[in-house]
Image (spheres, rainbow, N blue to C red):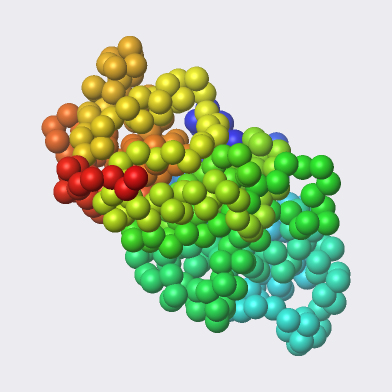
Amino acid sequence: MITTENKHDYYQALIDKNPGYEGIFYVGVKSTGVFCRPTCPARKPKFENCEFFETAQQALLAAFRPCKRCRPLSHPNHESELVQKLVEAVEDNPSKRWKEKDFQDLSVDESTARRQFKKRFGMTFVEYARARRMGLAMKQIRRGEAVIEAQLEAGYESSSGFRDAFSRIMGAAPTKLGHHHILKASWLDTRLGPMIVVGDEEALYLLEFVDRRGLEREVERLRQRTKSAILPGITEPIRSIENELNQYFEGYLKEFKTPLFFLGSPFQKRVWEELQKIPYGETRSYAQLATTIGKPSACRAVANANGANQFAIVIPCHRVINSNGDLGGYGGGLPRKKWLVEHEKRNINRSSVA
């Protein structure tokens, strides 16, 4: 996980073109949509336009494309012509799903491409191409385009194929799982758009809107912190939350009962615990929440803890607003926050389902 302190160190390394940071991080530039290595000779972006990643795959899944100047997918001291050729071919047609004939048309040996990409970047060429497609698809969804359009643009004719591909970027192959803890991931269609849910047989670990920025990295952090493989599938807590969400959106359910597994600092857990105490249909300000937990001067820290919430809707961070009555921020987008607040106010007196 990249901390705030690391981000500032990485930015300074970027300004200095420090070769000691090669392989340590990649930087995505929001204003251009490209990602670079630390020693890129291009004009340096402002700090606020930077996103930092530990791997090239994370940058790809966040919809950044490789920089043509510093070529972050080539070894810094040895630029592979094969890698360069394949990366350029993907950029010419990012939605292409590669087949054996496509390698033959480029006079490229498929197994050699797989080995070179795996050795240098920790992923095969096919995984790279898929990550690039999925990253662009996620970017389309974030812009508000229909999931079906993103699905087709990513080269998937069926929704099940698109969802399976999205799930596969989150987990290891079953033959490589060993004795790892296994989490299951499912796609839930809801009234406010698709959500991804992750859980084991005991509890949920994540519930978030598919179009939330940074979701792929959040899933990666979850996998690393729990030392788990995340694979497509269904568990009892996932069935439970799907049923509860349906009741919630119908206006009947006021309190979620599905068990949750929290990953966070003691302070974050304290904030999340207090969030669950905000009554359905009511709101609190960040200042009120900070005072309630005994930290009246910690409004910013409380807001950050809200943003780190693993469970959209279930842990109701949408019920926290600014002191002046404005909605404030929300990871799932302000239109969703507005809808959720109004939905609960409309249904506050509606009888709950037994």
| Residue 34 at least partly seen | no
The residue sitting at 49% across, 67% down in the picture is 137
The residue sitting at 43% across, 67% down in the picture is 140
Q: Which quarter of the figure has residue 223?
A: top right
The residue sitting at 61% across, 66% down in the picture is 164
Residue 68, position as x, y percentages in the image: 59, 63
**Residue closer to the observer: 7 or 96:** 96
**Residue closer to the observer: 214 or 17:** 214
- In this rendering, the answer to whether 312 lies above or below 166 is above
Residue located farthest toward the left when viewing the structure as drawn: 324
Q: How many marks?
A: 0
> Which quarter of the image is occupied by the N terminus?
top right
**Residue closer to the observer: 311 or 267:** 311
- In this rendering, the answer to whether 344 lies above or below 80 is above
Residue located farthest toward the front when viewing the structure as drawn: 354
Q: Would residue 264 appear left or right of 117 to someone viewing this image?
A: left
The residue sitting at 28% across, 49% down in the picture is 252
Residue 72, position as x, y percentages in the image: 65, 55
Q: Which quarter of the figure has residue 205?
A: top right
| Residue 351 at least partly seen | yes
Residue 5, position as x, y percentages in the image: 52, 27
Residue 97, position as x, y percentages in the image: 65, 78
Q: Would residue 5 appear left or right of 339 to someone viewing this image?
A: right
